[in-house]
Image (cartoon, grey):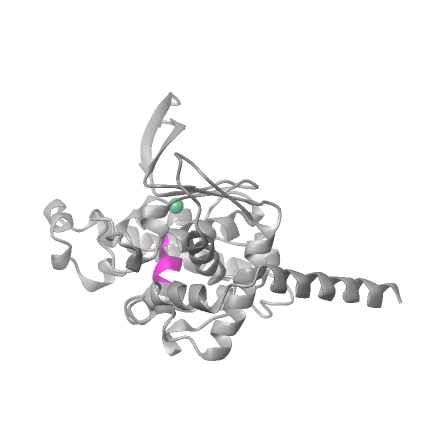
């Protein structure tokens, strides 16, 4: 009886959110037009994505920095891109935090790093996105925004699959079980038959291969990305930084350039397909 009541109340709350935060048709069409990697999605998948993005908008709190005026386009575009990785996992995977902060462009991150001999240095760097464990996701709208909104792709990116929103939300999933180490948690119900230890070992092996191939490139190759082997153009070389960054940039490629990823990195593609429960190259 109590179960039924809880289920009834949940359904009613969900229906109300879907109604109150509905993404209007013109905004939905503009949002899709700006995200070409979604064009192969089936009508049923797009309907599920729209519903999930609506619930995401209802749950999350958007704010801006540096006088950036928050628009419906920003809210919808970030929500839709953020929901792509959880399309077959569910909104529960983004539980425990609320904030999304948009900056007009790249922003400054100050952090400390410890070097090999234990000295701690203050580091100041520019970033297009940052995800805090249990905290907000911070994004540069210039990078996260729709290509059709007048923003050019950042010139310093070599890969064909750049997507800062998917990158930061992949970190969010990875951080559900601690540090961003490239191994997200798995669900007993959703990831039946997936062995965590095997998955982790395989991902780390793929990371080592990728980092070795990046290291083997002559320095000048990075100045002319066209001369890089195709396998190194599909994944952002930033992935060689750590397994956590590798998981995030590989996730970008998985959703934005799935055919290229499955062609050049089939093992990595299969690992991500098993975790995300999607097969975007088949679309
Ligand atoms: Zn990252």
Q: Residue at x 49, y 74 (%)?
A: 45
Ligand 1: image quarter: top left
Image position, residue 217 (x, y; %): 16, 51
Quarter containing the C terminus: bottom left
Quarter containing the N terminus: bottom right
99 vs 167, nearest the viewer = 99
Quadrant of the image occupied by residue 120: top left
Looking at the rendering, the stretch of residues picked out in magenta corresponds to 249-254
Q: Is residue 159 left or right of residue 136?
A: left
Q: Is residue 106 left or right of residue 278?
A: left
Above or below: residue 192 compared with residue 162: below
36 vs 30, nearest the viewer = 30
Q: Residue at x 32, y 41 (%)?
A: 105
Quadrant of the image occupied by residue 109: top left
Q: Is residue 174 left or right of residue 142?
A: right
Q: Is residue 212 magenta?
A: no
Q: Looking at the magenta stretch, what is its main secondary structure?
A: helix
- Residue 231 visible, this orientation: yes
Image position, residue 238 (x, y; %): 30, 47
Image position, residue 253 (x, y; %): 34, 61
Above or below: residue 126 compared with residue 86: above
58 vs 279, nearest the viewer = 58
Image position, residue 231 (x, y; %): 24, 62
Residue sticking out furthest to the right: 1
- Residue 268 visible, this orientation: no
Q: Residue at x 42, y 75 (%)?
A: 41
Q: Is residue 265 left or right of residue 169?
A: left
Q: Residue at x 45, y 54 (%)?
A: 72
């Amino acid at each position: 009886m109590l179960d039924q009541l809880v289920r009834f109340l949940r359904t009613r709350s969900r229906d109300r959110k879907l109604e109150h935060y509905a993404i209007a048709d013109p905004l939905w069409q503009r949002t899709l037009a700006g995200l070409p990697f979604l064009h192969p999605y089936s009508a049923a998948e797009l309907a599920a994505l729209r519903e999930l993005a609506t619930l995401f908008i209802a749950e999350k709190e958007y704010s801006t920095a540096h006088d950036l005026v928050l628009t419906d386009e920003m809210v919808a575009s970030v929500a839709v891109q953020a929901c792509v990785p959880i399309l077959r996992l569910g909104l529960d995977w983004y539980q425990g935090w609320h904030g999304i902060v948009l900056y007009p462009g790249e922003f400054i991150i100050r952090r400390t790093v410890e070097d090999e001999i234990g000295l701690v240095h203050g580091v100041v760097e520019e970033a297009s996105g940052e995800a805090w464990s249990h905290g907000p996701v911070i994004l540069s709208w210039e990078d996260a925004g729709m290509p059709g909104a007048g923003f050019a792709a950042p010139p310093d990116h070599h890969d064909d699959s750049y997507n800062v929103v998917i990158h930061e939300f992949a970190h969010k999933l990875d951080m559900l079980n601690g540090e961003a180490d490239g191994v997200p948690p798995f669900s007993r119900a959703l990831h039946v038959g997936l062995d965590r230890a095997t998955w982790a070992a395989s991902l780390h092996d793929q990371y080592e291969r990728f980092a070795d191939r990046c290291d083997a490139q002559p320095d000048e190759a990075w100045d002319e990305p066209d001369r890089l082997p195709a396998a190194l153009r599909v994944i952002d070389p930033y992935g060689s930084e750590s397994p956590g960054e590798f998981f995030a940039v590989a996730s970008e490629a998985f959703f934005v350039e799935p055919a290229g990823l499955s062609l050049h990195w089939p093992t990595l593609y299969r690992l991500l397909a098993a975790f995300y429960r999607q097969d975007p190259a088949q679309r």
